[in-house]
Amino acid sequence: MIKLIVLIFSLLYYVPCKANKNVVFIIGDDLKPALGSYGDLNAYTPNIDRLSSQSFVFTKAYAQHALCAPSRNSLLTSRRPDSLHLYDFYSYWRTIVGNFTTLPQYFKEHGYHTHSIGKIFHPGLSSNFSDDQPYSWSQNPFHPKTEAYKNAKVCQNSDGSLGKNLICPVVTEFQPDKTLPDLESFFFHKHHSFHKPHIPFKFPTEYLDYHPLDKITLPNIRVRDDIKKLNISFPYGPVTDDLLRQIKQSYYSSVTYIDDLIGQILEHINLNQTIVVLTGDHGWSIGEHGEFSKYSNFQEATGVPLIIHVPNLSKRKVTIESFVELVDIFPTLVDLTQVSAPLVKCPKNIKINTCTEGRSLLPIMLQTISSQRVTGKLAAFTQYPRPGPYPTMKPNSDKPHLSQIKIMGYTIIMKHFRYTEWVKFNTSNFIPDWNQTYGEELYALNIDPDENENIADRKEVANILKYMKKKLMSGWRYI
Ligand SMILES: *[C@@H]1O[C@H](CO)[C@@H](O)[C@H](O)[C@H]1NC(C)=O
Ligand SMILES: *[C@@H]1O[C@H](CO)[C@@H](O)[C@H](O)[C@H]1NC(C)=O
Ligand SMILES: *[C@@H]1O[C@H](CO)[C@@H](O)[C@H](O)[C@H]1NC(C)=O
Ligand SMILES: *[C@@H]1O[C@H](CO)[C@@H](O)[C@H](O)[C@H]1NC(C)=O
Ligand SMILES: *[C@@H]1O[C@H](CO)[C@@H](O)[C@H](O)[C@H]1NC(C)=O
Ligand SMILES: *[C@@H]1O[C@H](CO)[C@@H](O)[C@H](O)[C@H]1NC(C)=O
Ligand SMILES: *[C@@H]1O[C@H](CO)[C@@H](O)[C@H](O)[C@H]1NC(C)=O
């Protein structure tokens, strides 16, 4: 489930602005901060850890939506899902809301050569079946041929037959074309791209060695053959501890596989001249809250790694604990490269093509390294839609289509609390009705970091809840 997408901007050398730098942007698919440099003891990620040791490492980075297409389009246009009207996979912003400029498009228009390898845009309608060509890229995006086998029956069962399994360690030479998509991208381009840990957890078996089952600690997969065979009832059937351990082992092995490829990429990059950004489109829940998926507003689904290496600013690991959001990446790269004046903040109720609904991170990076007071955001926002108040197979409550959406869950994450309100949502005008609430969730992160106990109805926190609700309703502009 983690796909690593590498997007490379390489600077056209004749651009006469000496502050310009090359940019390598790497996005893992479903990659949560399951990394050594984020203190995850299950992880084995020596290469990303080495990059982190000379980078800014943001410990509170959030996706604006825990689903690939809405999250990626949000990141790449620096607009929130409510501005793109995208909560599923089935619309293209240029056609339905506005001719908004993307991050790679902006760099292309300012003298960069932009190239996409693997999954940067989500494929399909949400990027007009073309990875937003001809707007975003200087040359046609590269997709590995073996992406075609993404959901094919290529995973070995214990009886030797092949299945469409969730847990799928493979011997690479027995795979179609004797390779895997991330390996194919990598070797094809010598130093660029990948596709894991997105499900299925298909990775070369040797990466299991880094993650022995007995070292794995315990914390919608049901369409996969191996899981289906277990007859686990939907939606509340329990997954056994054994299976949970194996799923977790596979997730971390997929991350190690990607880490290895990233290590090989980094060998080809001169970090003195290249900005490197490593992030994920959203996280993934490995059994937390009984879920094995993204599709929620919880920490595991919305928290992402964000590692930014900047030549001359990054001599050591610099940890930044302010809240940051994926919409911040576009304005940050504009400032770091000085490719133009800073992006303007998108005005309220007026559509302009080039603007940001995020905030450049350069000020807090500079404040942190010069030990000044850090004036970052005090909160992050994320959202997730549902077709009704209860889990359902039809419509699929994990991935409702736009026309099925009836409720929007809006979440604000602040230092001590996470607050979510589920409100009636009108998909004709895209306006939430804050007078019609289906549910509220409040978690005290100091004492309940795993967000297991909803305290929204407790009298003792009534004022906190009121405060969080007010901040949530006033939204990202006022944080
Ligand atoms: C959208 O923007 C692109 C790039 O600036 C431009 O080439 C194109 O003509 C615009 N399309 C419309 C419909 O305005
Ligand atoms: C989307 O792709 C179609 C088919 O290639 C093309 O005709 C259309 O102009 C594209 N949309 C935009 C907004 O560029
Ligand atoms: C699941 O159900 C099928 C068909 O009812 C049965 O043959 C199989 O043994 C069951 N599997 C388990 C693990 O209970
Ligand atoms: C990068 O810069 C450092 C110090 O400024 C220098 O020691 C090192 O050799 C440089 N590396 C490359 C690959 O240019
Ligand atoms: C890094 O700093 C050195 C010395 O101040 C300067 O010569 C060089 O151009 C800078 N490099 C970049 C990529 O900004
Ligand atoms: C949704 O918004 C549209 C357009 O503003 C309005 O006509 C419609 O009545 C609204 N639907 C509901 C259920 O409120
Ligand atoms: C919600 O209630 C407030 C105050 O009662 C009212 O002003 C507002 O129009 C209502 N909003 C909607 C969408 O009904």
Image (cartoon, rainbow, N blue to C red):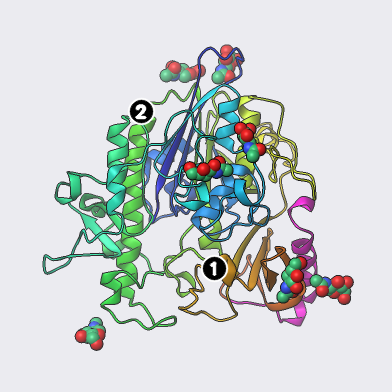
Mark 1 neighbour density, 10 Å: few (under 14) some (14–19) many (20 or more): some
Q: Is residue 413 above or below residue 52?
A: below
Q: Position of residue 54 (x, y in %)?
A: 50, 32
Give residue 267's mark.
Answer: 2
The answer to whether any part of residue 313 appears in the image is: no
Quadrant containing the N terminus in the rendered view: bottom left
Mark 2 neighbour density, 10 Å: few (under 14) some (14–19) many (20 or more): few
Q: Amino acid at mark 2?
A: Glu
Q: In screen coordinates, is 173 left or right of 214?
A: left
Disc 1 designates what residue? 450
Q: Residue at x 29, y 51 (%)?
A: 148
Q: Is residue 165 above or below residue 9?
A: below
Q: Residue at x 39, y 42 (%)?
A: 118
Q: What is the tally of numbered marks visible in this picture? A: 2
Give residue 274's mark.
Answer: none
Which mark is in front, 1 or 2? 2
Ligand 1 sits in quadrant: top right
The extreme left residue here reads 160
Magenta segment, which residues?
A: 453-479
For residue 139, which quarter of the picture? top left
